Amino acid sequence: MSTRRGSRPSGGASRLATGAGALVALTVLAYLPALRGGFIWDDDLHVTQNQLLRTWQGLVDIWLTPGAILQYYPLTHTSWWVQYHLWGLAPLGYHLVNVLLHGSSAAVLWRVLRRLAVPGAWMAAAVFALHPVQVESVAWVTELKNVQSGFFYLLALLGYLRWGLADDAEPAGGRRIYALSFLSFACAVLSKSVTCTLPAAVALILWWKRGRLAPGQVVALVPLAAVSVAAGVLTAWWERHYVGAAGEDWALSLPERCLVAGRALWFYAAKLVWPFELAFTYRRWALEPHAWWPWFFPLGAVAVVVALAALRRRLGPAPLVAALYFSGTLGPALGFVDVYPMRYSFVADHFQYLASIGVITLLVAAGTVTTERILPTASGARPASTRRPRCSGAPRSRKRRRPGWRTTTWGSCSRARAGPRKRPSITTRPCGFVPPIPRRSTTWATCSPPRVGWPRPRRSTSGRSPSTMGLPPRTTTSATCSSWKARSSKGSGTTGGRSRSTPSTPTRAGTSPSPRSRRAGDRRAASPRSR
């Protein structure tokens, strides 16, 4: 399928607008209670008591003065600066921006999954928008970092997929799309540096869809990788020197960090599958690297990835890609990088805002495919996507189809019928069936009535050639189809419930069979073997 905009069917723009509008409307409707909320937790440090939001000089300090803001997310603080000058400290405006950005992210996610031809793309985007795990990111004013960075992250992903998965080597406007995608990625990183995993996600998806990474695509991802590395190093340094993520609470050994990462992966996946007992702050785990049972978490996570890789030919690469995306996007929050929230807990719901896309998409797509397979079988109706077009006159294979269906196509005689699989007899086969006749190739291009009761000529024991036995020629075309049926119906008899007849040699117009051919046909009809 071409990725050019001009190749889309008419009316596609209206369907896209309707689907995106429905996602945004559902999001706003679901988060109406959050619009009545206020400021909580550390909203005072970022918004209510942040003096940088009051003046133009504060806007300059947000971008250029190290340590002026708690975390170096200048684009997020710029958004708060703009909102403060629009509606002051009224919490409704801040909550409304969060909700609208989250709904817009769901709409962009639908476009991304639709471009990847993921089954149930719209439903997966709706689950992402309405999942209870996302409430912490949307209803918390400080987590504008999540929803704003997620929106730019998905915009950049959509642009890179449109550029990387184009059918043409250099699609129209390819450079412009690449530049806009890079700009969106820079905005995502400046909103929250956790989006630095985008280059790995793009490379993973391109490998999934193309089977390899072209050299040009690798070169194009180098600038993104450079920005990601710089953002990650800057964030780790900033958290340690300005935020205060240093001390005994962060003095973890490598085995302890592996235990944290393994258990966190299972914790986040479990909350996505069964969002039960969600909390703003979870209890911090006690790490026991010398015990044997905590190692089941990291070893189990590795075993799942290895199993999905081994079963890739049977299950397809999609489950492996979803698992790698989930774990890779969670990488910055798995405990290998010291962040300040680790002082209270190793996990938080808002840490998996973008990583949840992998598990949600996999589960929704699997459910959609399973439903499409079960419902047509139960109702007895064949899906429209599996229907075969009418044949154009050439014989086709009579290979058995899926259970419950029998399709016979031969020449222009094509008919599909639903029902139990029965092996029909020669007199009840669908139209178009021609019993095999040795040493003769027949093309039935225009014979629509069922052809039953055709003779099976046998080789004579007298050693004569077929031309002297009254057999039909090797090739009979549609022009002689009617005359051949008329002549074969003469003198036919019934033996054992199956119609038999003596073949006659088709002749040219104005001529009659030779006496030699006529005598050979009479001897064959009178022989015991023909009876």
Image: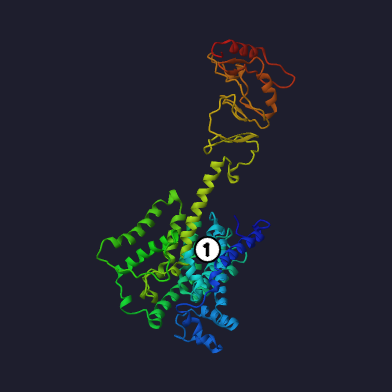
Please give the residue where the numbered disc 1 appears in the rendered image: 130
Image quarter of the C terminus? top right
* Figure coloring: rainbow
Q: Where does residue 299 sit, x and y in percent of width and height?
A: 32, 59
Whether residue 385 can be seen here = yes
| Residue type (three-letter) at the residue carrying disc 1 | Leu
Find residue 378 and report its image quarter. Answer: top right
- Picture quadrant of residue 420: top right
Q: Position of residue 177 (x, y in %)?
A: 59, 68
Q: Is residue 425 shown above or below 7?
A: above
Q: Residue at x 51, y 64 (%)?
A: 217
**Disc 1 residue crowd, few under 14, some 14–19, many 20+, Cα 10 Å:** many
Q: Residue at x 59, y 24 (%)?
A: 427
Q: Nearer the viewer, residue 261 or 37?
A: 37
Residue 184 in view of the camera: no
* Quarter the N terminus occupies: bottom right
Q: At x 64% / y 13%, what residue is drawn?
A: 516
